[in-house]
Image: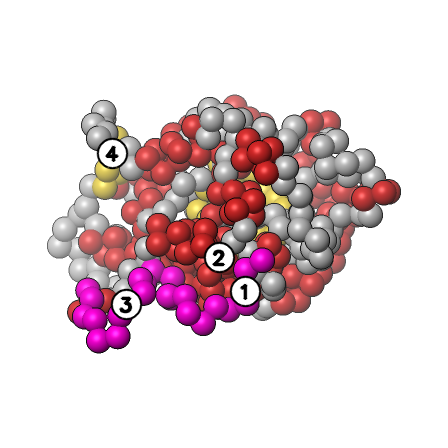
Amino acid sequence: MASSEPTSSPVPGQRRRAVGEETPEDREPPFLDLDLLEARARELLPPDVFDYYAGGAETETTMAEATPAWRSWRLRPRVLRGTADVDLSTELLGTPVRTPIGVAPWAYQGMAHPDGELATARGAAASGALMTVSTSATHTLEEVAAAADGPQWFQLYRLHSARHTDDLARRAGDAGYRALVLTVDLALLGRRRRDLRHDFALPAGLRMANHPPADAEPSLRDLATANWTFDDIARFGDLSGLPVVVKGVLRGDDAARCVAAGAAAVWVSTHGGRQVDPAVASAHALPEVVEAVGGDAEVYADGGVRSGSDVLTALALGASAVFLGRPVAWGLATGGAAGVGGVLDGLTEELAHTMALCGLPEVRSVPRDTVAPAGVIRRT
């Protein structure tokens, strides 16, 4: 397992240096190096745990294409706009946040760091970012809610009985979560070859804290979200007393039906490339979903966001916010709460810098014509 708060690891975004060595960091502000962070996480984590976080489904085509899809758009900067200062604050379903970059739900965070979701919650709160807490957390939803004074949503899917799932929705409302996120792209578990190769299992000593006892419910492979329909959107809203976000939408027609059925927001997501493969990239699905929703609900996106320019592209295409999965996992594994905060702060700083260069004063109103298709990209 990863050690708690490693003292010898570099700050996220900074490389290790020799004593007395002068590096670019001595002359310029440090930047967020996510490749370095991932490499450090690979060193710290057991191979099966790293591959659980890093891997995708089938041929991993969806995962591989996620970041290049954001780079298939090009920024169109404005000049002479006096935008040295950029306002990154916004609201998500009425909740104020200091950054439009949030934490996506991801499972079993206790494998990355002993404090797991508690550390992620603290790091997100310190950065003024919204955290989405997974059903498959290693701490109960009540424990995570109490860990930090920051905005949180609870992500829900059905891995157990309908009665227990309904109870989770009610508990989320009672615990102070601001929204309920229905993950709807998990009708069956994606075929994740890395996990099959390792015969992956949750390490001893960790628990799926929001799940009932294993001997009391069907196994994790007996998924039942395929039984959900559009009618369940309003039903879960009534049970929890919370606005409902539908996560895992990649089509405009589905997005419109979700909103008509009562969704307050739609979340464009490929589940980190861990479900359908190959699937359309979030960066390519987002414009269609935004057009179909037509301003009747907020739209979010995740999948392959790795730079401030990726975030700005998503905002220009109509997203109100983006959410990070793997980068936060690498931050947690290498630095606990501070590592999570370092990732969120680093990308937020990149976003501010890019927006200033593009003559954009605030994230709440990024014009669509900020980006244009790049056309055919020659790859080497």
Residue 72 screen position, x and y as percent: 28, 33
Q: Earlier in the sequence, mark 1 or mark 2?
A: 1
Disc number for residue 17: 3
Pick the front one: 239 or 348: 348
Which one is in front in this view, the residue at disc 4 or the one at disc 1? 1
Q: Name the mark on residue 271.
A: none
Earlier in the chain: of badge 1 and badge 3, it is 1
Residue 39 in picture, x, y percent from top left: 39, 52
Could you tell me the amino acid type at mark 4? Ala
Marks 1/2: CA–CA distance: 8 Å
Residue 3 image label: 1
Element assignment for label 3 = loop
Residue beneath disc 4: 372
- Residue 376 in view (yes/no): yes
Asked if disc 4 and disc 1 are in contact, CB closer than 8 Å, the reply is: no
Residue to which mark 2 is pinned: 44
Who's the residue at 52% across and 46% down the image? 47
Hey, which residue is sitting farthest left in the picture? 80
SS at mark 4 in the image? strand
* Residue span colored magenta: 1-24
- Labels 3 and 4: the sequence-earlier one: 3
Q: Residue furthest bottom?
A: 20
Amino acid at circle 3: Arg
Sooner in the amino-acid sequence: mark 2 or mark 4: 2
Residue at point 47%, 64% (across, down): 335
Relative height, residue 19 to residue 115 (above, below): below
Magenta highlight: main SS: loop
Q: Residues within 10 Å of mark 1 (few under 14, many from 20)?
A: some
Q: Is residue 101 visible?
A: no
Which amino acid type corresponds to the residue marked 1 in the rendered image? Ser
- Classify the position of the N terminus by image quarter: bottom right
CA distance separating discs 4 and 1: 44 Å
